[in-house]
Every structure is written in C-alpha cells, then in structure tokens.
Image: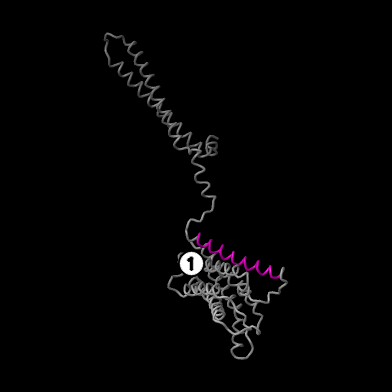
Amino acid sequence: MARGRDRSILPAAREQRRRQRSRARRVSRCRFSFFKCIGRQALSEGTGGTPLAHRKHSSFQRGHIELGIILTCQAACSAKQNRLQTPNRTDRPVTRPTALRPTLAKPTDRIAVGALCAIAASAAVFLLLDLYAVVAMRSRLESAISAYGVGSGRWIFTLAILFLAAGSAALLVAVVDQQLTRWRSGATVALTLWVLGLLAIAIFPKQDWSQPPSISGSIHLTASGIAFLSLPIAAVLLAKPWLRHRTHGVHARRTRLFAWLAIASFSPLLYAFVVAGVTDVAWWEVVTFAHSERLLAVSEVATLAVIGTWVLTRK
C-alpha cells in the first residue's frame, strides 16, 4: 500500500519528500557525531578541578547552541534554494505576450505586406471606379480601364497605377531578398518590365483610336502590351525552379496556374491584333476589349497576390 501511495504522488511532491528525508538524515548524523565527540571528550578528561558532571552539562549546553545554529543555517539555505527554483510572478508575463503576439520579425515580411496592401488599394480604386460608372453613369463597362485616365478624373487613375507599380516593385525586392530568384534572372527582368510598363501607362494617357494615332497613344498601347505579357512570363519563370520542391512546390504550382490564366485572358487581345494586322478590321472591333481587359487585370492582380503570399510563407 505504501508503494502504491508513493507512485500516486506527483513528481514535485515526491522530490520535496526526498529532500526532507535527506535533510533529516543530515541533521541526525550531525547530532550523533556531535554527542559522540562530547562523550569522548568527557571520558578522556581526568579528575580535574571541574567536576565531570559540570563539564558534561556545559558541553551539552554548547552542543544545543551549536545545533540550533546549524539548524537555523540549514533552514535559511533551503528557503533561499526554494526561492531560486520557484519562478517569480514578474517573470511569467515576459514570455507569454511574445508567444501570443504575431510579429513580422524580418524586414522582408514587412516589405511583402506593404506590397500586398498597395496592390489591394489599387485594385480597390479600380473597383470603385467601375461601380461608380455602373451605378451613377449607367454604363455597361464598354470602355477600357485606361479611359478613366482621360478627363478630370485622371489623377485617380494615375494614383491607382502608381500604387500598383510601387507594390509590384516592393514585391520584386521581397522576392529577391527571400532568394526565390536572383537579380540576374529572367523572372527579375520580366517583373522589372512590368513595373516600367505600369509607369509608362500612368505617364502617357490613352487616346481615342477613332482619331489618327499619336505618340502618347502609341506609347500607352505598347506599354500596356509589354506590361500585361511580362507579369505572367515572370510568374512562370519564377515558379519553374521550385515546382518539385518539398515545401514550396505547392506555391510554385499555384503561381504557374495563375500565370497561365493571365496568358489565357490575354489571348483574345492577341487574336484581335493578329486579325487587325491581316485584315482591314480594327482590332477593337474584333473582341469586346473592355471585358477582356478587365478579366486580364483581375488575373494579373491575383498572380501578384499569390506571389506575395509565397514570399510571406518562405522560411
């Protein structure tokens, strides 16, 4: 029964009981050795001037005093040891908030989060512009997105494009810093072309293609084609070395999937340009350009978001 009770005791209580037993053994040994020395001293002394009983009485008094000092010191030492082993209340809140509060320890994580926020802000501005056109202007969204860059509301369109370009540039820095690609690589060159194309779109406004071509309109059209083609190519090149990786293969395949969706969204516009080059039909009359452009823009923004989440999950 005693063994069963000892097994049911917690390890901390069992350790405390073991320490008490060892302390009691040490005290008993000290008492035994002390009284043994006193007895030997009393027997070795002869019949001197002081009676033997008086010498024993004084020795026993000194022994009790010394024993009390020993026990007091042992109690003070054990109390100090228990204070050192028991954590203070002020030590507990130091580690708990750091474990519960999510922090972005690396600067690259902050850059990636800022890039995703800028891209999301740009997408929100374009979405609000479309909602305003549908609700207030009763429009069917038959005009291109670049049409918002003509007229009094041009600064809103320019600001949204600049947000998208800044977020893409920050995402490029985060991708290289996380060693998903190198500065001298095809993916980096393609992402750089995407950013430069966005800047050219913001600087040079769209023109009315029913009028004779202008330099600004030609630059805008060329920059749009370069930008829309560069981003999916960059995503494919970025995902290619990581497709069979153990942890990053999922993100690489997801990035490649959205890149191919963007290329598929761009294919109707390519078809329109080819038909316009072969025949006399204008390219904006071959397909519904506004709807194809918006589908392409959604796929491009989704591709950027997938790359940003990949950067944040990179260890």
Neighbours of disc 1 within 10 Å: few (<14), some (14-19), many (20+): many
Q: Quadrant of residue 306?
A: bottom right
Q: Residue at x 42, y 73 (%)?
A: 184
Q: Foreground residue, 65 or 261?
A: 261
- Taking 169 as reference, is 302 left or right? right
Considering the numbered disc 1 on the image, is that residue within a helix, a strand or a loop? helix
Residue 131 higher or lower than 17, as above or below: below
Q: Foreground residue, 103 or 170?
A: 170
* Residue 95 place in picture, x, y as percent: 50, 46
* Residue 255 place in picture, x, y as percent: 55, 71
Q: Foreground residue, 312 or 117?
A: 117
User: What's the residue type where badge 1 is placed?
Assistant: Val
Q: Foreground residue, 189 or 178?
A: 189
The quarter of the image holding the N terminus is top right
Q: Which residue is mark 1?
A: 175
Q: Residue at x 48, y 35 (%)?
A: 16
Residue located farthest toward the front when viewing the structure as drawn: 152
* Residue 176 place in picture, x, y as percent: 46, 67
Q: Would you say residue 116 sits in the magenta stretch?
A: yes
Residue 251 higher or lower than 267, as above or below: above
- Taking 284 as reference, is 50 left or right? left
Q: Quadrant of residue 207?
A: bottom right
* Residue 99 place in picture, x, y as percent: 52, 50
Q: How many marks?
A: 1
- Taking 72 as reference, is 233 left or right? right
Magenta stretch: helix, strand or loop mostly: helix
Magenta-highlighted residues? 110-134
Q: Would you say residue 11 sits in the magenta stretch?
A: no
Residue located farthest toward the bottom when viewing the structure as drawn: 279
- Taking 203 as reference, is 67 left or right? left
